[in-house]
Amino acid sequence: MAGKDGEINQKVSKGMREKVSEPSTAKKMPSKPKATPKKSAANIAENPRPPKGKANKHGDFFVEIHEVETNLTHKVWYIPSNRQFVSMSIVFLDAGMKNVNGTHPALGLFTDMLTKGCGKLDQYEFLETIYDNGATISFASDIDHASITFWAPVSSYIVPLNLIPDMCLAPLLPNKLFEKARKDALNSFKGSLKDPATHLHEAMNAAFYPSEHPYRSSLTRIAEDIKAIKPQDIRNYLKLLCQGNAVVVILGPRENETEIVENVVKMLSAFPAKGTPVLTEYGPINTPEHDIHVQFDIPQTMISSRQPGFYTTDPNYYAKKVAFAIVARPSLDSLMYKNVRGDHGLAYYCYGKVCINRGDAALEFSAGTRNETTEQVKDIMKKTCTTVAKNGVSKSDFELIRKEIAGTLVVGLDSSASMVSFCVNNRILGRSLEETRNQLNMLKAVSLKDVNAACSMFGKEMRFVTVGGGGGNDGNIARSN
């Protein structure tokens, strides 16, 4: 077939050359190039890319995911690919765990130590094994889970894969390197104290979380923990967290699926077995009695507010997601941005975000403004929320944002890493495979009536935490920078 195509192309080219060589008196107009239509997120959501490989009944969602039954606590999700590498995330879940006497924030600063040798391999032997096989392995610790990210060519993934149990359960943590890590952690922590955002984060946690909540942190406690932590504390923490109840998402070649899953399950059998972690219910976040201000000698003020949010299990999740996006998504077109900055030019930034963790759900609003306009910005943010709670949103905003969210969901899955990350995030939040696949359909099913009913969530009392040179008199905290 290639030969025939080549013959046809040669004949056409020869004919064109002969025609061009003939003199012509006709004035030729330059041909107008065809415009390539731009694909917006909304257009892509209406006509998403079809699934690669074997089709399934979810034709509106292009990520093909296989759910594999194993002897693990959770089923393995496998994303078949035509690429010759293995990309994987392993997530150890333990919602509400206090992490060795509540020292989690400090422990998280030492996770780089896990690549400094493990089992029988010193630092150089460990790294040499990783590099020789073209692999990368990293460990990250979050407030209610820890994750391992793994990547390697399919031709050489087995050797680095089998380093993971020793990396988590038998790290060497040599004293000299550990003390250097401690010094670096202290320097990093001291540097963060000069950043107003650090104090905003602490003040927000203190204002909105009960004292016993594991998401609440203390700057004083973190400094003390960094100084007191010993290598054995890290080992105890890892043994407590890294259990056989891991959530696993793998992206790999279609033809190697069975072999890769078997090798991953075999590797994870080295971890202690443990049942499914129970999600701790902490109840709604606190609402402070008054606004809180942390005084910093800077020419602007950072403003933040938090309200009880919604979980992915909420039956009105998608309606609330659309409603929040209309009001406060990070966009020039959000109602809050237009009211604060577009109409009055009062803020350097103004946006909101939906925070959903395994043990907490909150709506967060943030803005940055000049010290003298702090109270004005707070009033406009309050008024925006109360107006939407009372009157709802317009049909045009609803239709635009619903398509935009759906389009962003699809466009965001344009790489192997993003596909794995998407699946991992859904699993951390407790979504089943059916729910994960069906998100576009759920979004399309949301009506304007549903969204306006969901807008009642904006009617709650707003209390603010501010850090900077401007703020009210109530609840002031003097903080030197």
Image: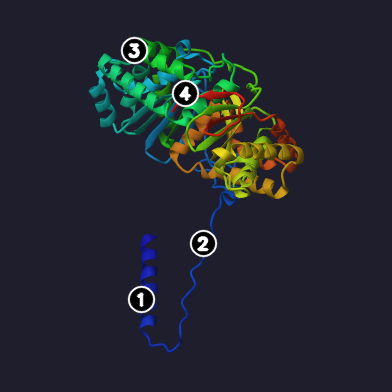
Q: Quadrant of the C terminus?
A: top left
* Inter-mark Cα distance, 2 to 4: 44 Å
Tell me the mark number nearer the camera, choosing from 4 and 1.
Answer: 4
The location of residue 383, given as percent across then percent down, is 69, 39
Which quadrant holds residue 14?
A: bottom left
Tell me the mark number nearer the camera, choosing from 2 and 3.
Answer: 3
Mark 1 Cα shell of 10 Å, populated few (<14), some (14-19), many (≥20): few
Mark 2 Cα shell of 10 Å, populated few (<14), some (14-19), many (≥20): few
* Inter-mark Cα distance, 4 to 1: 66 Å
Mark 2: amino acid: Thr
**Mark 4: which secondary structure?**
loop
Mark 3 Cα shell of 10 Å, populated few (<14), some (14-19), many (≥20): some
The image shows residue 173, relative to residue 421, as above or below, that is: above
**Mark 2: which secondary structure?**
loop
| Residue 454 as seen in the image, left or right of residue 340 | right
Q: Which residue is mark 1?
A: 14
Q: Which residue is mark 2?
A: 36
The image shows residue 217, relative to residue 49, as above or below, that is: above
The location of residue 217, given as percent across then percent down, is 50, 19
Tell me the mark number nearer the camera, choosing from 1 and 2.
Answer: 2
Q: Which residue is mark 3?
A: 231
Mark 1: amino acid: Lys
Closest to the observer: 236 or 230? 230
Can see residue 56? no
Mark 3: amino acid: Pro
Mark 4 Cα shell of 10 Å, populated few (<14), some (14-19), many (≥20): few
* Inter-mark Cα distance, 2 to 3: 59 Å
**Mark 1: which secondary structure?**
helix
